[in-house]
Amino acid sequence: MALLYEGRQIYFGEIHAAKEYFINMGFECPLRQTTADFLTSITSPAERIVRDGFVGRTPFTPDEFATAWKKSDDRAQLLQDIDEFDRLYPIGGEQLEKFKESRRGKHPSMLI
């Protein structure tokens, strides 16, 4: 799931981890608000709610949110995970051949 704010990426990853990311940042998810509505509200100054003790310490503008994301541990972990995936499954590597072989003998529309 990608969350954009005026064209800037402010989160990329699993939706429930995104909710936790913004709650840890200092935003409140009201009771009975869906995760999707909460995440949408983050991109609207009129809708997002800052928790007590975090006023003045949370990002406000799209650029501030994007900067916070770029500096976050969540993004750093995401980049490590992507690097590990690329190492294990390089483009055109052994896994591609295994996939092609698994498709041989299947329905003609499934062939590569």
Image: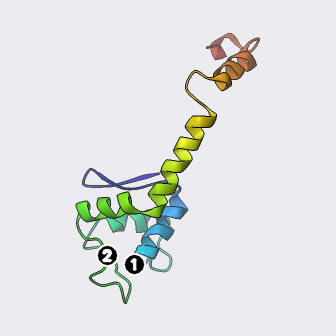
Q: Is residue 76 left or right of residue 71?
A: right
Q: Residue furthest bottom?
A: 52
Crowding at dot 2, Cα within 10 Å, few <14 / some 14-19 / many 20+, comes out as some
Q: Is residue 11 left or right of residue 109?
A: left
Q: Position of residue 75 (x, y in %)?
A: 45, 56
Determine whether the residue tagged by mark 2 lies in a helix, strand or loop: loop
How far is mark 2 from mark 1, CA to CA? Answer: 6 Å
Q: Which residue is mark 2?
A: 58
Q: Position of residue 107 (x, y in %)?
A: 71, 14
Figure quadrant of residue 36: bottom left
Crowding at dot 1, Cα within 10 Å, few <14 / some 14-19 / many 20+, comes out as many
- The structure's colour scheme is rainbow
Tally of numbered tags: 2
Determine whether the residue tagged by mark 1 lies in a helix, strand or loop: loop
Figure quadrant of residue 91: top right
Residue at the (24%, 54%) spot, across then down: 6
The C terminus sits in image quarter: top right
Viewer-nearest residue: 69 or 18:
69
Residue at the (74%, 13%) spot, across then down: 104
**Residue 26: which disc?**
1
Contact? badges 2 and 1 (CB < 8 Å): yes
Q: What kind of residue is marked 2?
A: Thr
Residue at the (49%, 80%) spot, across then down: 31
